[in-house]
Image (tube, helix red, strand yellow):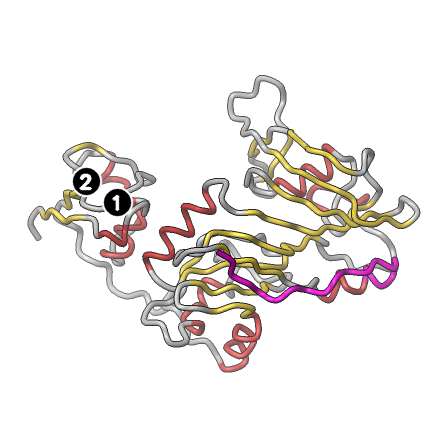
Amino acid sequence: MTVQTRKVGTEEGDTRLDRWFRRHYPALTQGALQKMLRTGQVRVDGKRAEANTRLAPGQEIRIPPLPDAPPPDRARAPKAVDERDRKALEAMVIHRDRDVLVLDKPHGLPVQGGPNIAKHLDGMLDALRFDAEDRPRLVHRLDKDTSGVLVLARNVAAAAKLAAAFRGRDVTKTYWAVTVGQPTPQAGRIDLPLVRQGGPRGERTAAAEPGDKDAARAVTDFRTLDAARRRVAWLELNPVTGRTHQLRVHCAEALGCPILGDGKYGGAAAHMDGLPNQLHLHARALRFPHPAGGTLEVAAPIPPHMKETFAFFGFEAPRTPKPRRVA
């Protein structure tokens, strides 16, 4: 293969360079691409680029001779989704149109693969094509143990617009959480920088020390919707930034009220006898720009384990509104 030059299509604007390569050259490994970027073999408009470089329509990408594709690894080939999983996935759909698919992701389902994760949503998305030519694309994430609203794009153009919206401040996110203890004051803004730390059990997020050069600003608005004798509280959380495990650390560290079931950040204090020992964090609603215009508002009902806890403490959740698209 000789050196090639390809132009970025009009529908591929704001796509990361590594994702552009993944789309056009699926056999190219991330390691091989990183080596070509590091040595300057891949260029965008004649200039060196990074894997996370955002592309613009019309830009020219220099593509060097690519390594031969490795033989197919049958052990890693995606498995067909069985009928039971297909029906379960289809039951998660709370909104579908030409550009957007919205799911109510259950607690315990990983969004993507990783160590010791054999079954995950990303590996089963072919079952959610419906009438679309392409498989749906992830544009944001939820933790494995967080339930609720998850948005997928149904085509390349929609994926670029939605990903840009989630990176910026154009998406309003509403989470519900049950915490151990009631925060004081009952509403406010948490502005606590966070940092990622390594450890024997993998990475975790922690409150940053003053002056930590690796700290990232993290902001969350919160208000108490109900409480039960100060033992537990039902909070509405609105993350202004989107750091990994931001809500979990902010509740545990800034409010002193860990999310019920969150042993990772709350330890033994996050558990209560007689209540479900699962993370009580739910992505209740999203409001975001629709790729075809207007704004889409979607919400998901609380999962079974949180419904059980709500009933125990007498919390009454409002009815879940139907998805609606407004001008």
Q: Position of residue 16 (x, y in %)?
A: 32, 45
Secondary structure category for the residue under label 1: helix
Secondary structure category for the residue under label 2: loop
Along the viewing direction, whichever of 148 and 187 lies nearer the viewer: 187
Q: Residue furthest front?
A: 327
Q: Residue furthest right?
A: 229
1 vs 2, front mark: 2
> Magenta includes 311?
yes
User: Which of the two discs, 1 and 2, labels the residue nearer the N terminus?
Assistant: 1
Q: Is residue 281 above or below residue 83?
A: above
Q: Which residues are magenta?
A: 309-327
Q: Which mark is residue 294?
A: none
Q: Position of residue 246 (x, y in %)?
A: 62, 40
Q: Is residue 168 above or below residue 297?
A: above
Q: Which residue is mark 2?
A: 42
Would residue 103 be found to the left or right of residue 58 on screen? right
Would residue 311 be found to the left or right of residue 137 on screen? right
**Distance between the alpha carbons at the discs numbered 1 and 2:** 8 Å
Task: Name the residue type under label 1.
Answer: Leu
Using a 10 Å C-alpha cutoff, classify the residue at mark 2 as few (fewer than 14 neighbours), some (14 to 19) or many (20 or more).
many
Mark 1 near mark 2, Cβ–Cβ under 8 Å? yes
In percent of the image, x 27 and y 58: which residue is there? 26
Q: Which residue is mark 1?
A: 33
Along the viewing direction, whichever of 186 and 20 lies nearer the viewer: 186
Task: Name the residue type under label 2.
Answer: Val
Q: Is residue 322 above or below residue 169?
A: below
In percent of the image, x 70 and y 62: which residue is there? 302
In percent of the image, x 48 and y 56: which residue is there? 327
